[in-house]
Amino acid sequence: MKKSFILAILALTSAVYCAENLVKNGDFSKVTADGKAENWTAWPQKLAAGVKVEVDKNTGHNDDQSMVISNPAKKYYTRIDQLNIPVKPNTKYMFRVFIKGMNLEHSKKCGSARVFIGANGKVDKPVALVGPGLQRGKEKAVDPWSFDWREYKTTFNSKKNTSIGLSIYLHFTRGTIWIDDVELVEVK
């Protein structure tokens, strides 16, 4: 019985991790001539003074590179998006990301650091949410909140969607997050 259970777990794990990552440039290793991560868009397009969205070539989860978002005040909402990621309808997917946070201070307007997985290739209607902001409440963390690299993952069904959108953000939160190894795979 135990042997069958272990073999089933190993088969499921290998099926998930052998699948193609649907997120393009999830490790932020591909950078454009102007220093921006390929396949990712910063929002808003014109960042406020002191807000930073860039590839950090000195900090990474499995290597020396990641994406960093830094807000100097709680009044900002800053994010990176990858939209129109093709998915199969009514199919189970696993999303995973590693995030590190430093000196996060949240506003009372539900500020946090999160990942929003949106329907129809956009980020207006949620399919799933995951990330440090959801974990913070469980830990009863106090501001300023810092943490080393943590894995955040969720599984979800794509329902009728043929594409999804990803948004990783700091919402009304002062501080810095690093993002690395973003992954979306079909669960077989």
Image (cartoon, grey):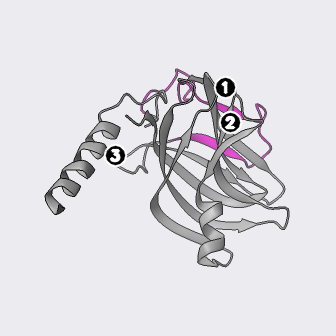
For residue 17, which numbered disc appears in the image?
Answer: none
Decide which of 66, 3 is in the foreground and name it: 3
Q: Nearer the viewer, mark 3 or mark 1?
A: 1
Disc 1 to disc 2: CB gap under 8 Å: yes
- From the image, tell me which residue sits under label 2: 118
Q: Residue at x 84, y 56 (%)?
A: 75
Q: Earlier in the sequence, mark 3 or mark 2?
A: 3
Precedes in sequence: disc 3 or disc 1: 3
Amino acid type assigned to the residue bearing label 1 in the image: Gly
Instruction: Say which quadrant the N terminus sits in.
Output: bottom left
Name the secondary structure under disc 1: loop
Q: Secondary structure at mark 2?
A: strand
Q: Is residue 133 magenta?
A: no
Residue drawn at the location 80% of the way across and 60% of the way down: 74
SS type, badge 3: loop
Measure the C-alpha gap from mark 3 to mark 2: 28 Å
Residue closer to the observer: 21 or 37: 21
Q: Residues within 10 Å of mark 2 (few under 14, many from 20)?
A: many
> 179 or 116, which lies in front?
116
Q: Position of residue 170 (x, y in %)?
A: 70, 52
Q: Seen in the image, is 186 located left or right of residue 43?
A: left
Per the picture, the main secondary structure of the magenta-coloured stretch is loop
Q: Quadrant of residue 71?
A: bottom right
Q: Which residues are magenta?
A: 29-55
Residue 9, position as x, y percentages in the image: 27, 51
Residue drawn where x is 85% and y is 62% of the image: 109
Mark sitting on residue 121: 1
Give residue 185's position: percent from left, percent from top.
43, 34
Q: Quadrant of the C terminus?
A: top left
Residue type, numbered disc 3: Asp
Q: Residue furthest front?
A: 1
